[in-house]
Structure formats: C-alpha cells, structure tokens
C-alpha cells in the first residue's frame, strides 16, 4: 500500500536520490551519463554525505507544496513539488512506474490546489512524461520548447495545463 503525505526535511536525502536517479534515467537520455552533471545541478551530489551538498538539495526541494509517496516498507517512491497554480516537478521511482503512484500524487496535489482556490495548473512536462499527463487531462498549451536544466542547455520540454473543476 502506498500513502501520500507531506514532505519532511528528514526526507531530503531519499528525495534527492529519487530525483537524480529518475531524472537521469528517464529525462536525460539525450546526453551520456558523463555529460549529465550540468543538467542535474546540485542533485548530481545526491549520494554525497557532505553537509553543503545535502543543504543545497534540501533547499531545492522546498516549495509551497511538497508531497511524497511512501510504500508499505517506508521507502519514498515518489515526490511532487508545486504551488496552487503550477506543478514544479513529479518523480516516481522507475521500478514503481505504472502502479498509479504518479496519479495518486497528482490527484492529491490537484485537490489541494482546488482548496487553495486554484483554477488552472500549468507545468513544463519532460518529453517522456507527456503521455502520462495527457491521460490525466492535461493539454499541450504550445509547442515543444528547448531550454535549460540548471547549467545544461538543450533540454526539451512541453508546456501543458489543466483547468480544475
């Protein structure tokens, strides 16, 4: 059984590792592993024990709303960050894809956004995640754009949005 709960600072190491692993495996396939560091920013140090690395990652995770998905063994297998009108990021551990965890996180987030008066959620989808968001009612709002991820240039993304009911 998976539960959705608010993020706690004590989750930052597990969340940082989840983000670096998932982001690299599914969203940075257009660059070799040796070329990923600029695209990962501080997350490239997610497995470091250095206090400054951990503090930088902890700072990046902070958002108006952060929720984690925790499995029955107490492992964090998903994380969502956002605010009432914008989804910043959503990651689900690769070995848990297709189990409804991303849907659970997103539905929880949308419910919170509605309670806060949100009317529309905008996001910048990775190309990998477009079909997932479309299945949950998100629509492409313009064409694919190229931008950056931290110091890495050439990252392609799709603007999307969903009107909340």
Image: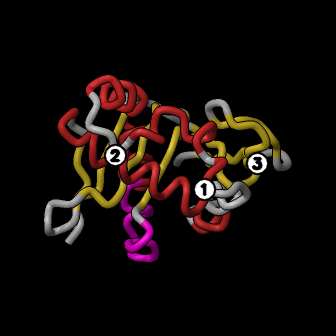
Task: Give whichever of discs 2 and 3 has the lower sequence position.
Answer: 2
Marks 2 and 3 sit apart, C-alpha to C-alpha, by 26 Å
Q: Position of residue 39 (x, y in %)?
A: 62, 40
Q: Residue furthest right?
A: 143
**Residue linked to disc 2:** 47
Q: Residues within 10 Å of mark 2 (few under 14, many from 20)?
A: some
Q: Quadrant of the N terminus?
A: bottom left
Residue 102 sits inside the magenta stretch: yes
Whichever of labels 1 and 2 marks the residue nearer the N terminus, that label is 1
Question: What residue occupies the far front of the structure in this picture?
Answer: 34
Q: Secondary structure at mark 2?
A: loop
Left or right of 58 in this view: 32: right
Residue underneath mark 3? 156
Q: In this picture, which residue range is highlighted in magenta?
A: 94-105
Q: Position of residue 32 (x, y in %)?
A: 67, 57
Determine whether 163 is above or below 105 in the image.
Answer: above
* Residue at figure coordinates x 45%, y 39% from the top left: 43
Determine the residue positioned at 32% across, 61% down: 77
Q: CA distance from mark 1 to mark 3?
A: 17 Å
Q: Residues within 10 Å of mark 1 (few under 14, many from 20)?
A: few
Question: Residue 140 placed where, x, y %?
Answer: 75, 52
Disc number lying in front (2 or 3):
2
**Tag 1 residue:** 33
Q: How far across and how far down the image is residue 146, in percent?
A: 81, 42
Residue at 42% from the left image edge and 29% from the top image edge: 60
Q: CA distance from mark 1 to mark 2?
A: 15 Å
């Amino acid at each position: 059984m998976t539960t959705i709960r608010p993020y706690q600072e004590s989750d930052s190491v597990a969340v940082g590792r989840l983000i670096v692993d998932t982001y690299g495996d599914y969203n940075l396939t257009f660059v070799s592993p040796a070329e990923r560091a600029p695209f990962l920013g501080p997350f490239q140090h997610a497995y470091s024990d250095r206090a400054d690395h951990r503090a930088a990652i902890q700072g990046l995770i902070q958002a108006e709303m952060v929720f984690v998905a925790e499995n029955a063994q107490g492992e964090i297998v998903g994380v969502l960050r956002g605010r009432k009108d914008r989804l910043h990021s959503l990651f689900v551990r690769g070995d848990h894809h297709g189990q409804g965890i991303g849907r659970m996180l997103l539905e929880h987030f949308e419910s919170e956004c509605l309670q806060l008066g949100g009317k529309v959620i905008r996001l910048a989808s990775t190309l990998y995640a477009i079909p997932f968001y479309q299945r949950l009612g998100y629509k492409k709002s313009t064409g694919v754009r190229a931008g950056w991820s931290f110091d890495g240039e050439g990252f392609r993304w799709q603007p999307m949005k969903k009107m909340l009911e």
